[in-house]
Amino acid sequence: MALEVSNDTFYLVQLPNGKTIHSDEDEAIDYLQNKSNNVDPESEDVSVVKVSVDSGDWTIAEMSWQTIALRLMGEN
């Protein structure tokens, strides 16, 4: 399977039952929201990581929970 990366960025969602790769932030947040029903809120196995590649330089940064929460609240 191949994932085409637009804008040299993709997102990794980690949950206790596995990891998935998403092509954009909205898709990653939606997936996290849809799969989080039985996840322990104190679990350290939950994260969204943004991976960017710019001219061979990789940037890997975990999205803050404040950013994720604001995105989820903005959808309501």
Image (cartoon, rainbow, N blue to C red):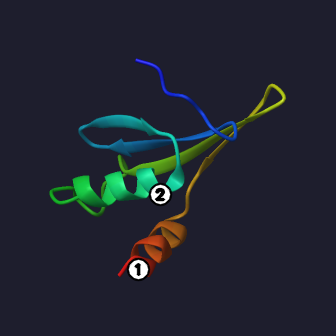
Q: Quadrant of residue 6?
A: top right
Residue 20 screen position, x and y as percent: 38, 36
Say which residue appears at 15% left-offset and 56% top-offset. 38
Image quarter hosting the N terminus: top left
On screen, residue 23 versus residue 6, left or right, reads left
Instruction: Name the residue: 35% across, 46% down.
Output: 45
Residue identified by numbered label 2: 26
The earlier-in-sequence mark between 2 and 1 is 2
Give, as a three-letter code, the residue at label 1: Met
Residue type pointed to by label 2: Asp
Q: Cα distance, mark 2 to mark 1?
A: 13 Å
Residue 18 location, quadrant: top left
| Front of the two marks 2 and 1 | 2
Other-residue count near label 1 (Cα within 10 Å), few / some / many at <14 / 14–19 / ≥20: few
Which of 9/43 is in front?
9
Residue 51 location (% of width, % of height): 62, 39
Secondary structure at numbered mark 2: helix
Q: Determine which residue is flagged by label 1.
A: 73
Q: Nearer the viewer, residue 46 or 7?
A: 7
Q: Residue furthest left?
A: 38
- In this rendering, position of residue 25 left or right of residue 33: right
Residue projecting furthest to the right: 55
Residue sitting at x 34%, y 55%: 32
- Residue sitting at x 42%, y 58%: 29
